Amino acid sequence: MLLQLGPLNVLTDPVWSDRASPLSWLGPRRLMKPAVDFEALPTLDVVLLSHNHYDHLDAATVKRIARRFQDAVWLCPLGLARLLKALGVRHATEHDWWERVQRPDWSATCAPAQHFSSRGLRDRNATLWCGWVIETDNVRVFFAGDTAIHPELGVIGKRLGPFDLIMLPIGAYEPRWFMKAVHMNPEDAVAAYQALVDGSPVAPPCVAMHWGTFRLTDEPVEEPPRRFAARWHEASLPESANWTLAHGETRRL
């Protein structure tokens, strides 16, 4: 996602490569082209990374961004700064859950998530995974990263909210016996949203993400937004707050 928050341009888990893989000729291939042409990107100020899986941290994309936007600040969970710097990133800082980054014009907080990490056979869970809350220009956005539903979501809402925009994953969830511990399904995403906004007088928009770009699991690729919309309606949440975007669609907050 590209977030333009007042003067700040923020990119989340950028992947411009054709495959989510360490190999250019093997692994999940893109079903949808990148929503924004790389050359059309505005000057990037902040890049938020949630973890090191290949569909979230793409080495070729990191190198391209690092060359073109040398002043961009990269925020990542514990253990990933070394890799980013090896890929050419000049300003990379790694953070633990609940750690806050304060800059003159913006702030960000590393938020808990339930997932795992690895880029090879021997580094499973050697680095952390997370979500992010970023604040600037009187706007507060929660980017959940890649996560299953977990008890800390309500705590995130109370400690770091209220939010003006919430970004939650809804795809890559079947078979459920295998994926439940690491990925939300659409029903989980609605429950996560409710936990995050519990007690809030308004229902902020929810961007449903992490679906439709790579075929990673067994569910039909177009199923997640349909299931999410149905559960959202069943929960009597405002239809106007369900921001399930078409690829490349822009919304104004």
Image: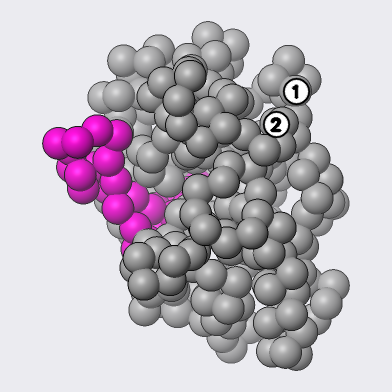
Quadrant for the C terminus in the image: bottom right
| Residue depicted at 38% across the width and 15% down the height | 87
Where are the magenta residues, as a range? 107-133
* Rendered location of residue 11, percent (x, y): 60, 36
Instruction: Please name the residue that numbered disc 1 is placed on.
Output: 37
Residue for badge 2:
34
Q: Residue 89 is drawn in which quadrant?
A: top left
Residue 109, above or below 74 = below
Specify few, some or many for label 2: CA neighbours under 10 Å numbering under 14, 14-19, or 20 or more: some
Secondary structure beneath label 1: loop
Question: In this picture, is 239 found above or below 73?
Answer: below
Q: Residue 100 in the image: state x and y as whole percent.
A: 38, 51
- Quarter of the image for the N terminus: give it: top right
Query: Three-letter amino acid code at disc 1?
Result: Asp
Q: Amino acid at mark 2?
A: Pro
The span from disc 1 to disc 2 (Cα, nearest Å) is: 7 Å
Q: Residue at x 49, y 54 (%)?
A: 217
Query: In percent of the image, x 84 and y 51: which residue is there?
Result: 252
Marks 1,2: beta carbons within 8 A: yes
* The furthest residue to the top: 67
Asked whether 110 falls inside the magenta stretch, the response is yes
Magenta includes 48?
no
Q: Main secondary structure of the magenta part?
A: loop
